[in-house]
Image (cartoon, grey):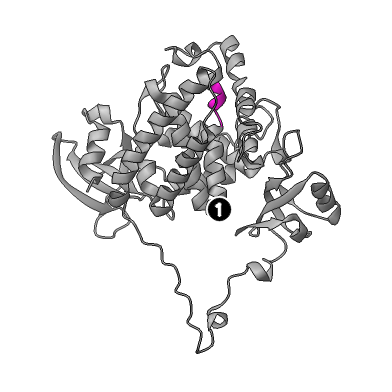
Amino acid sequence: MLITLPISELVPGMFVDSVSKQFEGVDSIKIKTRGLVRDKSIIKRLMSEGVQELLIDFTQSDVSVPTKYQLKPDAELVTKADIKPKKAKIKKIISVEQEFAKATVSYDQHNRNLQSLYGDVTSGLKMNIALLDDIAKDIVSSVFRNHNAMTILTRLKDKHMYNWRHMTNCAIFVTVFAKYLGYKENIVHELAMGALLHDLGQAKLPQGIFSKPEKVNKLEMQAIKKHVAQSLGLVKGEKGITPLMLDMIVNHHERLDGSGYPRGLQGEKLSRPARIMAIVDVYDAMTADRPHQLGDEPINALRYLLANKQMFDSELVQRFIKCLGVHPVGTIVKLTNERLALVTEGNHQNPIQPKVKVFYNAKHKHHVTAKDVDLTSAEHDLKIVASIKPLDYQLNLARLLKEHLLV
């Protein structure tokens, strides 16, 4: 359970996940403490650093949730006879098909707006923070209505639009993952903003580096590494930029073993948001089409993250896999009955058994009447054999999504 507390309520035994608010007058890079508060001296140090609010993870704390933050039992909600009880807010469940129509329009609009903003920054014009804030709010709202719709759209590829699609996709993945981890909606919005901003400094670098059809050389890589400082320079002093966002911008290329950049931080010096951003950044970069490479399949990107435990938080990687699934929504998979299916809903309990929509006979190479199938059902013994690239069967993924998900 994650709860934001003021520094005045911090006590020994609480586990600090991240600093959510710090005195803005501190000119240096904000503090990124994460770990168990063992004694009062740590609290005094945090106060001296200007920390005002912290995100506490009570699942890792040695103390219980303070009474005022605990959910009240039903008995305590009973009011006097003459007082009308408040109706509990019931969030309407939106199907993936219902949300997909709106998400499709939003996703295209966000990419166009980010392309324009990216161009403005490249030209030296002032960055529009309000636009980014609106995009973050829209992504978070969509994900909280139905987390699958926006995630499906991240499977669409365009190597000529990678830079701004990467911004959008990272914001979507971070939002979906943060919601899965239990973060409150206001914190999820901050995380989404951090994801939108994390690579924006690349717009200040020579754009030929990013459009060349072959891998960058060592000299070009040194130039690319400067995007972290450029991103920081773009947002510093802007209204609404929080320490959490700065943390994600500065540290998303750092690695647990100290092999990252720009400062070679390692271990506990890296906050949870920075670790989340590192995972999401690498995952989207590996699975997207770019000028110098075709995107890899999600399962291979997840294997890479899982295999490199020295660089990425292995617990978070495992939870990321459970969140997205081994075959994320929007992926085309081949089943044991020689049918192709579109993954439409993940399975957090068993990531290899999602819900799918069967639409194609791979043996005879023709479309079939679409049918929704839950791979956990005892009515059949269907399993996923492999993920499939749409072009292997001359399938247009964008058209396929519209045919089967737009209602």
Q: Is residue 71 left or right of residue 323?
A: right
In the displayed orientation, state which residue is furthest to the bottom.
81
Q: Is residue 45 left or right of residue 397?
A: right
Picture residue at 44% right of the left edge, 35% below the top: 169
Q: Nearer the viewer, residue 338 or 194?
A: 194
Q: Nearer the viewer, residue 218 or 386?
A: 218
Picture residue at 56% right of the left edge, 12% below the top: 220
Q: What is the count of numbered marks?
A: 1
Q: Position of residue 62 (x, y in %)?
A: 72, 61
| Quarter that holds the N terminus | bottom right
Q: Position of residue 343 (x, y in %)?
A: 31, 45
Q: Is residue 295 left or right of residue 136?
A: left
Q: Which residue is mark 1?
A: 183
Picture residue at 49% right of the left edge, 52% below the top: 180
In the displayed orientation, state which residue is furthest to the right.
41
Dot 1: what SS? loop
Picture residue at 43% right of the left edge, 16% below the top: 292
Q: Main secondary structure of the magenta part?
A: helix
Q: Nearer the viewer, residue 387 or 131?
A: 131
Q: Is residue 294 above or below residue 239?
A: above
Residue 300 visible in rendering = yes
Q: Is residue 147 magenta?
A: no
Residue 304 visible in rendering = no
Q: Is residue 379 above or below residue 176?
A: below
Q: Is residue 357 left or right of residue 319?
A: left
Q: Position of residue 144 (x, y in %)?
A: 43, 52
Residue type, mark 1 in image: Tyr
Q: Position of residue 230 (x, y in %)?
A: 61, 23
Quarter assignment of residue 197: top right
Sort mark 1 into few (<14), some (14-19) or many (20+) by Cα contacts within 10 Å: many
Tell me where the magenta segment starts and ends, as one range. Answer: 198-202
